[in-house]
Amino acid sequence: THQWRGIIEEYRDRLPVSDSTPVVTLREGGTPLVPAQVLSERTGCEVHLKVEGANPTGSFKDRGMTMAISKAKEEGAQAVICASTGNTSASAAAYGVRAGMVSAVLVPQGKIALGKMGQALVHGAKILQVDGNFDDCLTLARALSDNYPVALVNSVNPVRIEGQKTAAFEIVDMLGDAPDIHVLPVGNAGNITAYWKGYQEYAADGVSTKKPRMWGFQASGSAPIVRGEVVKDPSTIATAIRIGNPASWDFALAARDESGGAIDEVTDREILRAYRLLASQEGVFVEPASAASVAGLLKAAEQGKVDPGQRIVCTVTGNGLKDPDWAVAGAPQPVTVPVDAATAAERLGLV
Ligand code: F0G
């Protein structure tokens, strides 16, 4: 009779909400922490996957969006706006419906996965495709929220970070302490900021005895933090993290430096290799951007940077169903058979 109540109710005392905050929730959070057998063998470590694709709209964004939309509603907003590479817009669209608010979303034209576009459409968001990249969309969203009656729900809104930090709480609650290393993909750098905040708060309150080293990975064609400069025309097949000027850049550097961690890059080829490994060997289907964390862990292990015996958590941020093109591309076409057991058995290699 008891189901997970969503991150606001589960972590109410650690979030900036009060009794008068209207809680807009789809029961996000409480996502699986899955032991990764093949990754553990390959690295000699105890590797877990925090499967954020199991959230209601299929990505970690729901943790931040339940907070952002609840607070916007509390403040009387009637419309919200975000810039997005797809997942934030899908989440804003769904939570906007729950709140009875208009959601406006700005996406880079031609550069978001079909599943995410479908989500924004079916939830009835007002969508504008912007003739520019994500960074341009964010500039435009900020300008609109500054000058018009619409609340910004991107992760530059600090309550988004508050919601997303709960993923770190769940991991510590599950493992009994913080891991030694936490690995995640980095785009606009809100999530690495949020996890680090969560781990710091639990350590400060003595819930955990330690804090992990934070390892973030950007896609090589979209790696401004690694390069130390804005990337004007970011590119990568991992469209979710195709970002050239991350809003939380300084917070990401702080997470890296305060934790003794690292921010590095992985190529699209490495991302796709990890994407296929996760699906074919761990049974976990993620979207390409999510595989950047695992690609990064494998790269670090191959470089001898991963001491054996550590406890490592990789966040896989979004569901593979959002962007299935990469699952189908290059895979053999299934053969067609008549309704005949002998033929089917033969084709299946059973005889
Ligand atoms: N993984 C996925 C699946 C994402 O959608 C994003 C960001 C990230 C990783 C990177 O997280 O930006 O906090 O560093 N997606 C945003 C969006 C930009 O609009 O959906 P970050």
Image: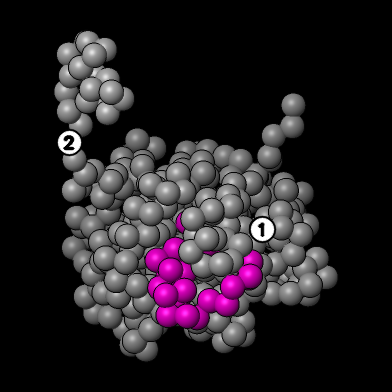
What amino acid is at disc 1?
Ile
Crowd band around label 1 with a 10 angstrom C-alpha radius: few (<14), some (14–19), many (20+): many
Q: Residue 247 versus residue 193: which sits nearer the camera? A: 193
Q: Which residue is mark 1?
A: 171
Crowd band around label 2 with a 10 angstrom C-alpha radius: few (<14), some (14–19), many (20+): few
- Is residue 168 at all visible to an observer of this figure? yes
Residue 311, magenta (yes or no)? yes
Q: Residue 34 versus residue 1: which sits nearer the camera? A: 34
The count of marks equals 2
Residue at 36% over, 42% down: 321
Up/down of 250 relative to 237, above or below? below
Q: Residue 44 versus residue 322: which sits nearer the camera? A: 44
The percent position of residue 341, horizontal first and vertical second, equals: 26, 12
The percent position of residue 54, horizontal first and vertical second, equals: 51, 44
Q: Nearer the viewer, mark 1 or mark 2?
A: 2
Highlighted magenta segment, given as a residue range = 294-316
